[in-house]
Image (cartoon, coloured by chain):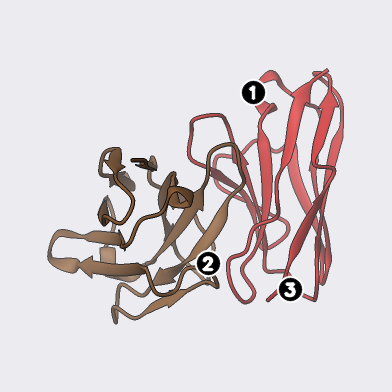
Amino acid sequence: QVQLVQSGSELKKPGASVKVSCKASGYTFTTYAMNWVRQAPGQGLEWMGWISTNTGNPTYAQGFTGRFVFSLDTSVSTAYLQISSLKAEDTAVYYCARDPNSRLLDYWGQGTLVTVSS
Amino acid sequence: DIQMTQSPSSLSASVGDRVTITCRASQSVSSYLNWYQQKPGKAPKLLIYAASSLQSGVPSRFSGSGSGTDFTLTISSLQPEDFATYYCQQSYSTGAFGQGTKLEIK
């Protein structure tokens, strides 16, 4: 069965970096794109962008350029989200989600809570 | 960018009620409109894709309709497990979500 398993919660200080992983299983990793979605505490879902698992080409939504980087290691069927120069407002749950067709999100990871606090 | 607006933002209803949630796009998204359900502390779950197609395993009391800029999600007879937050999402250009509709027990 399709599973996306994300890395565990992180507590970081402002200015630090964090790398969240999303390991896929139960399907051919390079057949489906991967999207990332942010949810700040008590808030709605924000689409961050997506990465082609075929080409490795990322696309970032407005507001997620510069400090946010999507990457892949196809040898271990894993997608990554790296956030640099962390700010308190980056505190959120970050989800990866499988994309079979143009930003349709059919399977989701369990989410990774990133807390940024001094 | 295309903006998605849901109404209402919150809704109180009783078990057995018929409920409709509306989603409006700032410009046409054709039928590239999806609906998700999220329960507290859990990841979102895909309910409806392409405006009206029911995702596998989703109960038939859920239905979607619309095209262009105006869409609806209908739950024909609310069950206790349906109390959650619902999001629309356009997949026409980006993957932007609406702000969500919280469905609460009356």
Chain A is which colour? brown
Q: Label 3 belongs to which residue?
A: B29
- Report the residue that reaches farthest toward the front: A118
For the N terminus of chain A, the image quarter is: top left
Q: Which residue lies furthest to the left in this view?
A: A75
Q: Which amino acid does label 3 sit on?
A: Val
Q: What element carries label 3?
A: loop
Q: Mark 1 sits on what residue? A: B81
Label 2: chain?
A: A
**On-image quarter of the C terminus of chain A:** top left
**Could you confirm whether marks 3 and 2 are on the same chain?**
no
Residue A69 x %, y %: 33, 69
Report the side of B12 relative to A70 (left or right): right
Residue at image coords 28%, 41%: A10
The answer to whether residue B22 is visible is yes
Chain B tint in image:
red
Q: What is the chain identity of the residue bearing mark 1?
A: B
Q: In this view, does B79 lie to the left or right of B17?
A: left
In this picture, residue A104 sits left or right of residue B72: left
Q: Residues within 10 Å of mark 1 (few under 14, many from 20)?
A: few
What's under tag 1, amino acid-wise? Glu
Report the residue marked by disc 2. Answer: A103
The residue lying toward the viewer, choosing from A89 and B1, is A89
* Residue drawn at point x = 39 percent, y = 42 percent: A111
Q: Do the residues labelled 3 and 2 touch (CB within 8 Å)?
A: no
Mark 3 surroundings: few (<14), some (14-19) or many (≥20) residues within 10 A: some
Whole-percent x, y for residue B70 in the image:
85, 63
Q: Splitting the image into 4 quarters, where does residue A67 fall?
A: bottom left
